[in-house]
Image (tube, rainbow, N blue to C red):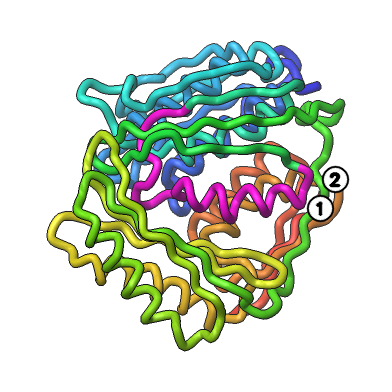
């Protein structure tokens, strides 16, 4: 089971390290819950235009604290210092968390990032957990619900993670109001993080591109917007000579929004790419954004898309044996995540290569 706070020294985390964003907070607190080690964070998001805890990050703090009855100091909006002391091992159960409750007027903070922070503690909690998460489901600078459903969770399933998610309501910036539900099967154990080691992950080859799946969605907007996004994407991807299946959907939500998500399915791995609409941006330009991302990644020959790579470091560290992935770029998020994980766990990350980077995790 995790260590108790009384028998372990606090982990000191510099929130300004490298990328200096919210991923430092999420990874540090997730591992604090898993290991039972108290954690002090300073300079939280100090490099951002609005430093400190935003509603999204404050919701993560409160949610993880509820899982382990943590004592917390500094849990307030725009706080740049935080002390987090777990009192118990994480508990399975039914939980509801709403990003809008963190601030007057609501928030479209990403609930995909909230889900990722809660996933591994609940795997260690034993039993089956049910989550209801409310906020933004498709917002910039974070994985969308479609990324979780079609790329992230299928990849984790290869490591023995059993989790299912459903989209109840769409939520876009700035109003949010979206909702997803999740079911997570616990996998408790007796190692240093209170869970059975995950199966090692090796993704060093991607194989041929087999198909592209996508959906173009207009929320509280005219039908033609979804059709124009899908039509333009199909036009831009036709020369790849694989089946391209993009659905056109018009849905209702709290506020308007438009998005297209593309999943490139290779023999050994999938990769996700998103184009986000905004007022005044033509529907065709939204599709072009997603297609450009897909084609740029495809041209590298790398199996793991760079944004997925940084999301895989934590499960790689929780695996019982060496894991290895190849990606096309070292993002600042990836380098930052590796640094934070190594403050808590006896693992070693090493990256090598130039145009295509190979990242290994040794336990």
- Residue 18 against residue 188 in the figure, above or below: below
Count of picture labels: 2
| Residue bearing the label numbered 2 | 320
Q: Counting other residues with Cα less than 10 Å from the Cα at mark 2, is it few (<14), some (14-19), or many (20 or more)?
A: some
How would you rate the neighbour count of disc 1 (Cα within 10 Å): few for under 14, some for 14-19, many for 20 or more? some
Q: Relative to 185, is 166 on the left or the right?
A: left
Q: Which residues are magenta?
A: 133-160
* Residue where numbered disc 1 is placed: 200
Circle number at residue 91: none
Residue at the image position 26 percent from the left and 26 percent from the top:
106
Confirm whether residue 261 shows in the render. no
Q: Is residue 253 visible?
A: yes
Answer whether residue 140 is magenta in the image.
Answer: yes
Contact? badges 2 and 1 (CB < 8 Å): yes
306 to the left or right of 82: right
Q: Nearer the viewer, residue 55 or 25?
A: 55
Query: Which residue occupies the foreground of this view, 358 or 40?
Result: 358
């Amino acid at each position: 089971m995790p260590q108790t706070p009384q028998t372990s020294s606090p982990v000191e985390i510099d929130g300004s390290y490298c990328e200096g964003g919210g991923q430092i907070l999420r990874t540090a607190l997730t591992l604090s819950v898993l290991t039972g080690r108290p954690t002090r964070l300073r300079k939280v998001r100090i490099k951002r235009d609005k430093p400190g805890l935003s509603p999204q990050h404050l919701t993560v703090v409160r949610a993880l604290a509820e899982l382990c009855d943590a004592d917390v100091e500094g849990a307030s909006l725009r706080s740049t210092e935080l002390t987090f002391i777990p009192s118990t091992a994480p508990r399975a159960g039914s939980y509801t968390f709403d990003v809008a409750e963190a601030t007057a007027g609501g928030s479209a903070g990403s609930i995909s990032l909230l889900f990722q922070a809660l996933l591994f503690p609940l795997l260690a909690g034993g039993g089956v957990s049910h989550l209801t998460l409310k906020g933004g489901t498709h917002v910039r600078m974070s994985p969308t619900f479609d990324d979780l459903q079609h790329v992230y969770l299928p990849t984790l399933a290869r490591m023995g993670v059993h989790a299912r998610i459903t989209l109840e309501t769409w939520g876009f910036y700035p109003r949010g109001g979206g909702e997803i539900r999740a079911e997570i099967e616990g996998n408790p154990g007796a190692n240093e993080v209170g869970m059975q080691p995950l199966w090692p992950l090796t993704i060093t080859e991607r194989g041929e591109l087999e198909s592209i799946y996508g959906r173009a969605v207009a929320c509280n907007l005219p039908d033609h917007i979804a059709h124009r996004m899908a039509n333009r994407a199909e036009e831009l991807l036709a020369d790849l000579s694989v089946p391209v299946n993009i659905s056109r959907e018009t849905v209702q939500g709290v506020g308007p929004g438009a998005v297209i998500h593309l999943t490139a399915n290779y023999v050994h791995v999938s990769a996700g790419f998103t184009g986000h609409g905004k007022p005044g941006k033509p529907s065709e330009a939204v599709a072009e954004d997603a297609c450009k991302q897909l084609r740029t990644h495809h041209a590298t020959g790398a199996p793991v898309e760079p944004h997925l790579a940084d999301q895989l470091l934590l499960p790689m560290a929780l695996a019982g044996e060496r894991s290895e992935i190849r990606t096309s770029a070292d993002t600042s998020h990836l380098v930052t995540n590796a640094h934070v994980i190594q403050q808590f766990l006896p693992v070693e990350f090493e990256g090598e290569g130039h145009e295509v980077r190979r990242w290994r995790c040794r336990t």
